[in-house]
Image (spheres, rainbow, N blue to C red):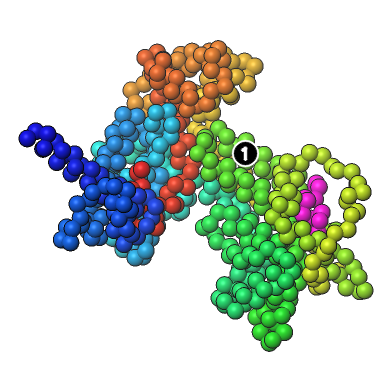
Amino acid sequence: MKKVIEKKIQSDNDCAYGYLWAAYNLAKRELPKEEFPFMLDLIEMAGKDLKRDSTVHYSSNQSISEFQSAIADVILEDKLSELKKCGVYSIVLDESTDNANRKRLLVYAQYLSKSEIDTCLLNNIEITEGSATADVIVSKILMELRDKGLNLDNLVGVGTDGASVMTGRRNGVVKQLRDKCPSLVGVHCAAHRCALAASQATKNIQEMEWYSRTVSNVFRFFSNSALRENKLREIQELLELPQLKYADIHSVRWLSLENAVSILYRTYPALCATLSHIGASGDVVAKSLYNDVCQYKFIALTHLLMDILPFVGRLSKLFQSESLDFSKVSPMVASTCDSLQDLLECEGVFVDKLFTFTVEESGSVLYRRPSEESVSKTVNEGIKSNIEFDGFETDSDDASTESETVGDVTLRYYQQQKESLPSITRKYVNAITQNLENRFEQKELMQCLEVLVPTNITKQTSIGSYGEKELRIVAENFSTQTAINVDDCMSEYRQYKRLVVGSYSNKSLIEMYAILENKFLRNYQICFFCLSAVLFYLCPLLSVNVDFPRRTESKQSLGHA
């Protein structure tokens, strides 16, 4: 009898596992709930008996929601257990709207788990109040932390996208949370800052604003008509150019300008030919666009941006790296600014090509370029040459080799506009570098925390005095919320420096955290706490994760996994 019961229990467990597995994968792959029965069919085909019959099959929307909710509760419970053991943590916030146009607040917690940064979606909260004011958001956050059993005193950082409701100096969310947690640091997402630095650089530069409007107009002209799209593809194929759709510029989408400009560069002859063909049939919008894109300054700015934007794009991608920490941000920004300033001293690869492709012939100015300039490999090689500059090349016989050209374009206003490019380059590059420097100006506390980075310690000629002043500021900041003695912290910091120089000079902060936790916790409690705080100050550098799990309810419910 016992064996029969055990067999029955095992059979039921296998059946339940099959249903839960199907519900979990449905959510993680963002599939509609209508796919659930087909997943069950697949499981049964693999030999699992799910005991479905005509009356009981557990595949209704309500059943699937209950399965997913149960899984999410278990995952969240495990995550919260890890978070509470860790001690300190940071939160990352973002506002959004769901498919039903309801206001939502996404609240993430970031903490260290097994010597790795981990992210946990605490909740996707619906804001039912009239507007998402700072007071409403703070009340939701405090309620959420209280419901999850998280100690507000252990909150050391909050990351946001920089919206005024979040970062307002008088009554913003960060300000109100700091009033309750004096040592809390608010961090504006690095990738957002980078995107804003690039997008806002076009302001007050008339030519760049005109260019952005023209790019958006080109996108709308073709995206609003399948007939025009078909004609564009037809001409692209005729000219043996890549068949690409034009992209729009979005202020909230990172790298959208770089993508839009790259497509325009690769298909520019086809764009002009298509607009000319459509305009000849009497389309006034096509005629107007043709007059714009055939101006010298349009293709000149396209070449210029092909030189500039990859530097900003590379910086943004580096900021989205999972291994990013705050000690790397300033060097990355400084390197990018230096590279951009170099373009003022020496033309980039694509501006240099512009002068080669622009030829005067029979009283007209033509834009004539080799067909391989539209190939992705050639474009990427040009970008790589800019980023990995290794000296000037000497002229060679290969440079004079003629290759097949594609789709000559007659440029307008060349004489009037050719002298303006250096001025525009200078204004735009200076605007971007100034924006980057202003937006990534480090706060005093963040600068002080850098004295805990092992590589910074080992680079110093005088280890004994290095970081004393900065570490005291850090210790005094945390002493407002913890019972640590500042003098004890300073003494342990001196031991920490000797430990780093002697045995761990090449370790990262996260690796040092693990070492202190496993080997020296009792002797280095103060430094352990400071390192913990550093790790959670670096966590909110990115709110990238917050921007993704929005699209479906099931994905949001399993955002912890």
Determine which quarter of the picture holds residue 305.
bottom right
Towards the viewer: 398 or 161: 398
Can residue 173 be seen here? The reply is no
Is the residue 90 above or below the residue 128 in the image?
A: above
Look at the numbered disc 1 and give the secondary structure of its residue. Answer: helix
Q: Amino acid at mark 1?
A: Met
Q: For mark 1, what is the residue?
A: 332
The image shows residue 221 at horizontal and vertical percentages of: 61, 75
- Taken as a whole, is the magenta stretch helix, strand or loop? helix
For the point 48% across and 50% down, the residue is 162
Towards the viewer: 151 or 41: 41
Queried whether the magenta region covers residue 353, the answer comes back as yes
Towards the viewer: 376 or 471: 376
For the point 91% across and 53% down, the residue is 400
For the point 78% across and 38% down, the residue is 390
Is the residue 499 above or below the residue 349 in the image?
A: above
The image shows residue 432 at horizontal and vertical percentages of: 65, 51
Q: Residues within 10 Å of mark 1 (few under 14, many from 20)?
A: some
Count numbered badges in the picture.
1
For the C terminus, which image quadrant?
A: top left
For the N terminus, which image quadrant?
A: top left
- Residue interval drawn in magenta: 344-354
